[in-house]
Image (cartoon, rainbow, N blue to C red):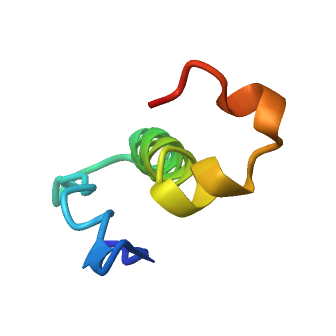
Amino acid sequence: MANYESEGRNILSTVWHRIPRDVSDAALALIVEAFNQEIDRTVDDSYAMRLARPADTNKGAQ
């Protein structure tokens, strides 16, 4: 579970990954990496991050 407040709500409330009880170390590393990448994508697309980008990279983003 992760938490990042943007526009008055936790935009990461739907970002989660299930970790099986019998997961191997290698599989766990892949799950954690995928979780982190999903968090990064979600935060990067947040309203605050869109405002923080230089104006030329915001063109076309609505």
Q: Nearer the viewer, residue 41 or 5?
A: 5
Q: Is residue 22 left or right of residue 27?
A: left
Task: State whether residue 30 is above or below residue 8.
Answer: above
Counting from the top left corner in percent of width and height, residue 51 is at 64, 54
Counting from the top left corner in percent of width and height, residue 52 is at 72, 56
Task: State whether residue 7 is above or below residue 60.
Answer: below
Quadrant placement of the N terminus:
bottom left
Task: State whether residue 5 is above or below residue 32.
Answer: below
Q: Is residue 55 left or right of residue 20?
A: right
Numbered label tally: 0
Q: Is residue 59 left or right of residue 32?
A: right
Counting from the top left corner in percent of width and height, residue 55 is at 79, 38
Task: State whether residue 5 is above or below residue 62.
Answer: below
For image coordinates 56% across by 18% down, the residue present is: 60
For image coordinates 37% across by 46% down, the residue present is: 24
Q: Nearer the viewer, residue 47 or 43?
A: 47
Quarter assignment of residue 12: bottom left
Quadrant placement of the C terminus:
top left
Counting from the top left corner in percent of width and height, residue 49 is at 62, 55
For image coordinates 28% across by 49% down, the residue present is: 23
Q: Which of 21 and 59 is in front in this view?
A: 59
